Image (spheres, coloured by chain):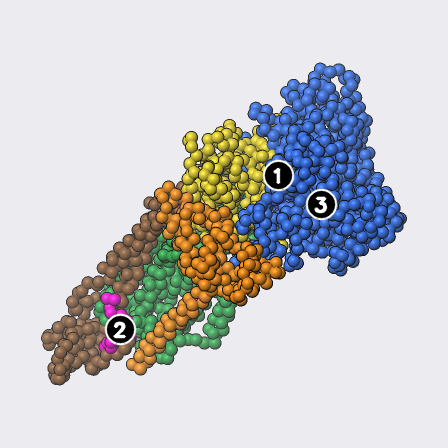
Chain colours: A brown, B blue, C orange, D yellow, E green
Amino acid sequence: MYGGYQGRYAPKTFVALYHEPDDAARAIDVLREIGIEDRFIQVQSGVPYRAEFLGRPERPSGVPKYAMVGAFVGFLAALGLYYGTPLLYPIRVGGKPLLAVPPSFIVLFELTMLGMLIATFLGVFVESLLPPVFGKRVYHPEVSDGAIAVFFQVPAHLAERVKQALAATGPSEIAPAEGTFL
Amino acid sequence: MSQEQRLTRRDVLKLAGLGGAVAAVLSGCGPTAKYVRRQPYYDMPEYARPGASVYFATTCRECPAGCGLVVRTVEGRAIKIEGNPNHPVNKGATCARGQAALETLYNPDRAKGPTRQGKPITWDEAITALADLLQNTPPESMAFLLGLAPDHLAELVYEITQALGAPPPLRVGALAFMEARNTLAGAAERVFGTKALPTFDIADADLVLSFGANFMETWLSPVYYGKAYGAMRRGRPGRRGILVHFEPRMSMTAANADLWLPIKPGTEGLVAQALGYLVAEAMGREPGEGLFQVDPAQIAQQAEVSLEKLEKVARYIANEAEKVVAIPGGVALGQSNGFAIAQAVLSLNALFQELGKETGVFFTPPVNGEAPLAPATLADIQDLIGRMQAGKVKVLFVHGVNPVYEFPPSWGFAEALKKVGTVVSFASFVDETAAQAHLHLPDHTFLESWGYQRVQVGADRETLSAFQPVVVPVFDTKATADVLLAAVQQVGGALAEAVPYKNEVEFIQKKVAALRERTDGIYAHPHPQVFWNLFLQHGGWWTEQSQKELARGSVLNVQVGEADFDQGDLYLVVFPHPILAEGASANNPWLQETPDPTTTVMWNTWVEVHPETAARLGLQNDDVVEIASPYGAIQAVVYVYPGIRPDTLAVPMGQGHTALGRWARGRGANPLALLGPEANGASDPAFARVRVRVRRLGTRRQLARKENVVGVYGDGRYEPVEAKAESGMKE
Amino acid sequence: MQATSSQVRKAVITVVVLSVLGVLLVAAVGLYRSQQTPPQPLPFNHQVHVQKVGLSCLYCHSNANKGQSAGMPTTQRCIACHQQIEPTTEGERILRQYAENEESIPWVPVAIMPDFVYFSHQVHVNANISCEQCHGEVGQSTIAPSLTKKQNMGWCLACHQNQPQERVARLTSCEACHK
Amino acid sequence: MAEMDPQHTKWVMVIDLDRCNGCGACVTACAMENNVAFTGEEENAYGRGMHWLRIVRYWVGEWPNVQVRFMPMLCQQCSNAPCEPVCPVFATMHSEAQELNIQVYNRCIGTRYCANNCPYIARTFNWFDYEWPEPLNFHLNPDVTVRRRGIMEKCTFCIQRIRAAEEEARMEGRPVRDGEVQPACAQACPTEAIVFGNWQDPNSKVRELAESQRGFRFLEELGTEPKVIYLSSQKHEF
Amino acid sequence: MQETTLPAELHERVEELREEHLLLDPRPREEMNRMVLEAMEDVNREYIIVMTILGLVTAVTLFGAWGYLMSKGLGLAGIRRPIYWGLFIVSFVFWIGISHAGTFVSAILRVFKAEFRRPFTRAAELMTTFALAGAGLYPLIHLGRTWRFYWMIPYPNQRWLWPNFRSPLVWDFLAINTYLLGSTMYLFLPLIPDLAMARDKSKGWRKVLYTILSFGWRGTEEEWRHLQKAIQIFAWAIIPVMFSVHTIVSWDFAVAMKLGWHSTIFGPYFIVGAILSGISAVGFILYMIRISVKNMRYFIRPEHFDALGKLLLIISMGWAYFFFNEFLLEWYGGEHTVQEILRYYTTGDMAPVWWTMVICNILIPWLVLWNKNWRRKPWVMALMGIIVNIGMYAERYVIVVGALSRNRIPFDWGWYKPSLVEISIALGTFTLFFFLYGLASRLIPLIPVWEVEEGHHAHGLKRIGKGVVKTVAELE
């Protein structure tokens, strides 16, 4: 965020802590009124809130795409294993055809599902950029106590103004946020 | 197995793979550990190739029948026993016992070397001791007990005893008297005029009447009879021979019969005569016309058999059958009137001949007319035991038989043995007799031995069946013939002159020398060495052409009479175990593991009890019972057996060893303990005359059966499951 | 909190690196050891026999075209030539000893076929497969060779699958090689 | 088929139940040829005998007309073998060349599914590592793997003998002759009840026997297409 | 929550509702966090003693016995010809059945928005994972050559061999692995926020552990969005996987040419049986958690047992339906062997086990569970959990051992006696399960706090006339 700015224009991150979603939603409105774009605001919460609750922009999750790709890969793997490996070394058993169709559905199903589940699982981490191997990130530990932390980035010279504006929304705390390793 | 075996008589068997140290492959965890490690030869015989099989022809000595074998060996180890396809007795087949003979050879419980009073000695010491005995014992106080095999040893011992002036060797064995060989030969002499064991030619018979003869199991020559039976059943297109069997219990032979008539023990002779009467009647003969003077209806009642069934059989013989054979044997000959029964049944054959039917009794011609030494009679044995008891026997030599185990204890052999100064056993195993022997000079097993056997039953031609070693001796054993000859030479003098053989092979070569003159053999060659090689290669000598000559007999009107029985509640049938026979090979694990055909029992002694009798006595499967006769008692496990008369019990022989080895010792019981000393009229033991009481002991022991009791009999109860059996078998 | 986090990161990285190194080390030692030839009762030199003397493989391994096993030469076969040669090397002296004692030479096998495999040299030799095709250039080695090619099931199959069409089914069926 | 196809044989066994007298020679012969382990009394009493070939014995009828039927039972080498497809690792498979049901011991991992699925109960399992105390192990057949614990085994129609005969025939450039291959059981059988041969050979003994009116295949209705053909016993009734 | 608008005269009723329903009885998040953490950190002496005993017993009875079994051979188990599968497979099917609990609770109930699930989804999912861990051992234990199990895995190798994909055991292998991986991931995903919470609130080694496990979770909008989407996908996707697992297990039997097994209804029959045993086991586990873990009486209340009881009753009826179906059709057929199998089950040696099955799975649940008061008693439900699981174990025993004891050749029927080693291993998996569960109860938050809090947000009271009712807002 704000890459390239130095000195008093250098961006600074602050956190405002709320205990009610209503307050947090108002705070976000305030920030937006001040002119801080949505992409410079980040909300952390101990329970999931829908975007609409806090007046945040709806964005679709990328996880289903992973699921689909994973399922597809799993399906292909199953196809390869079920219909490919017997051709590599044909071994006949029990008068059954080498490439028997009915049992293939079982293998296809299982591996498709496995691919899908693994991809979905990994998708969460990739999409959320977890674990944070690339550096420090802002966090407020009270989030896990149910607080809603609203992080926002402002150029340093605007910080005081924003803080004052937010005070009206009843935050339990407004403080500069430091990135940490988690 | 680590001694260095040096080249012996023939370099043929010098195989370094075995001669050197034999060790399991080092990877002890893998299955390879079970194989024997292969090593390169020091000097490879030209016939051998690494990893390739070499086959040696020899003869089976698990029983005296003399079946020809071909033994597959690989790098000096015997791997598999196969039948010799050209052999006139078994024509390529073998029985279970022959198959398992490799376990006799490689049995870990074999005697490992000569011992005196249980302590190992060298063979030189052993031979010196033996020479000492031969020299310093008055000849009349020596006694030799030999088995029915091998014949060459019996003949050598006979020569030695003749030279010494000692009593001739007695050939004995439990199997021999269970087969009632003397009775059969005696009856054959009376009916057919030949004193020899008759062979019954059932292969092309239309009907076989078997009076107790368990000819498919162990009787005389089971593989010959197996072959003949198969041929009788399905050997001729469109003609199928029928088997009718009379026996109180369903033996394996009875199990194969089309009609099994469980007649009352002891009435076999009467039934045979009644049947003869009925056949003659059906063929339009008037009673009294040289026929058995009997009343069939009364006999049927006496024998507890349906007259109607007998009449049906008689009509079948009269109208349908061209060739009919009547066989006496097994338990029938062990009755107190066994000799009469044998004559009555053999006479039946003669009667059929008279009636214009074909019958099939023939005698295997002895090779060059030399008959083997006959088995001892009960009187001979009792005489020997009496002399032993009286302390008149100073030295007893025992080979090929285990009398302490094989003679019923009531004969008193074991006690008499204690009065013998020196007992010399030549057994390959530390059996019950060897365990009491002063000198134990273990012989090779037959797969390591030279020798021959004179075929008495089953061959239709003169047959001398040869033994040859197929492997080098596994343990430090020595051929008894060689040991005796070495002792004889050490004694020297007149004895050595009278018995002038350097070793066993020379003796055998001399014995077979006369055959070189014969031109009717399967091979002929005047040169001794070539002839000898051919002899070994073929596994013996026999004539090219069949010499089968069906014997003609005369009908004897014997008075069969009633059989006598001892006091007791139930008749007892003691029978040779179909697999283990008399039990000499009871230490062969696979023989123990082969299920008995009719009960599927393995590894133990059972007593067959009819379901009704079992219910009456409160017996169930697997109950341990005590069976007591006036002569002794044994414990056995109840097998509720649907195929036995309710008034009869049956116990197989073969178990109850107190020695012999880990797989035989302490297993089951020996029913010979129940038998008495009476004879059957022909000086064979009347083993069927005993009657017993049975008592539940309250303990149970699960019999190892291949069958499932529930599946076959229902939940522990006896219920014939006909429908179930039939569902799998199209009839 | 930061300190703890970086300690954790360091610890995790160290453990991963160490275990990778450990696995590599074990593999390297194993690989090295598997390539060593076992000590033999006498130092036999194939090169001398094959290249200098010009013996064919079948002279000593005479059963290769007759049966399953190629066979090792008997002591007699060795000494037949060597009794005419004055022993100069250690190996020749040891050989004489074995011959004098009438003992077979306890060669340590370098190629132990598993006991569940059926393999016949005869069939392969008669199918015009040269010895070198499987055994490599044994004739050039100076010590008892370790197998130059990894002989495993896939190695066998590589050849068996590459056969005229009508034979492949038989040659790739399990019972063709497994007993 | 006029010519025998050397690439394709169909081994068939005919068992004449009318000849079979149940003597058990086949059982022992099989064990001796194939290194079948013995397990002793206790194990056998608990149904753990290793017999590849057993003689099934049935009682038929009521006293005194009770009769016995013997039926040697072994792996039927089914063409549609139920045991084969259930093996996860192809340890049991169908040989196209031999038309046999092959058990690859060293591939077996011991799921025992094949044994459950065999309607003939023809398979036995190595419950333990069985011992052949030295020197009893000397007679072990080097052509047959000694199975260790955890492995399923069964009758192979003595495939080692088939292989040896085929190899010999191939070296001599001729087809395998009828009767040249004999499994241990057929070889030992005193009554010649067991006959073995190649179905593809139109002149073979098995072909002639199998076409008998008495021929049937056990549990044929299951569609397993066994390659053991039984000839039924027809006892004469008096 | 808008209870301020409720009139005072309804106060009593409100209190009643609040006591009844966890989700109407909110507590501050900090407090719930504290309660959960307290429960986790409550490593007291009793706990250590119990866990030590469980651990030692597992080490001996399961792993010790297994090692012994492997070194000697499967003969140590009571299996024999023709009963080649015994207690191991019975236990395998049993544990696979138990493993259906978690998925059923947290996937099916989640999809159908059954709100009462919220506090115990994790407890149930843990059961799935640990039951699968136990179940997964059995195919290995039961192998004759366990050390060769990897031949079932499809991977390129020098043998050029692949597994036989036509074998039900490979289907099994794939399905169990899919299910194990899937359900473990499904357990883990909703756990992340709770682990992050634990990370924030703990010290020492726990902090290290949770830092690693929570993957740097912060609770940002994106994280929540992706997580919820993923949970949604999982909830839908894991259901067919779950069905497939037990169906395939049933096919192990049903595809066999074995009378008593070869039945078309085995798939659904097994699934219903699995859910029956799973759900009843959840009841037992919840009871155990409630009595043995600190602060859990707040989270796990009679309402949950009541709901489980109702489910159990329905599923027991479903099971009875399938069971009757299977029995009737076999009874009606004329096959000798099938007739014998049924006779063996109902009046033969197998009768005690068969009747145990009928009584425990049908009779007792039907007699007890219709009664709301009994359903609401935690100990009753715990008892039901034990009884039904005894019944289900018996069912598997009957199917596996019973059917194998009878075949088409009466000569080769058999009987089976589990050996000490087998029983020891079977018991060992129980102790392993409880050991793992006990371990987990102190290592990860047993209650998904964020889900409970979400539930608190979603639930409210509404006055209708003079009454007051519970309302649920759809948050997801």
Residue A169 lies, in percent from the top left, at 17, 77
Residue A3 lies, in percent from the top left, at 14, 77
**Magenta part of the protein: which range?**
A126-148
Residue D161 lies, in percent from the top left, at 52, 43
The quarter of the displayed image where residue B181 is located: top right
Q: Alpha-carbon distance for marks 3 and 2?
A: 93 Å
Taking the spot 66% from the left edge, 34% from the top edge, the residue there is: B524
Residue B310 visible: no
Q: What amino acid does circle 1 point to?
A: Asn
Q: Alpha-carbon distance for marks 2 and 1?
A: 83 Å
**Location of mark 2 (residue):** A132
Q: What amino acid does circle 2 point to?
A: Pro
The reply to whether callout 3 and callout 1 are in contact (CB within 8 Å) is: no
Quadrant (top left/top right/bottom left/bottom right) for the N terminus of chain A: bottom left
Q: In the rendered view, tell whether residue B258 sits above or below residue B628.
A: above
Taking the spot 80% from the left edge, 52% from the top edge, the residue there is: B490
Mark in the foreground, 2 or 1: 1
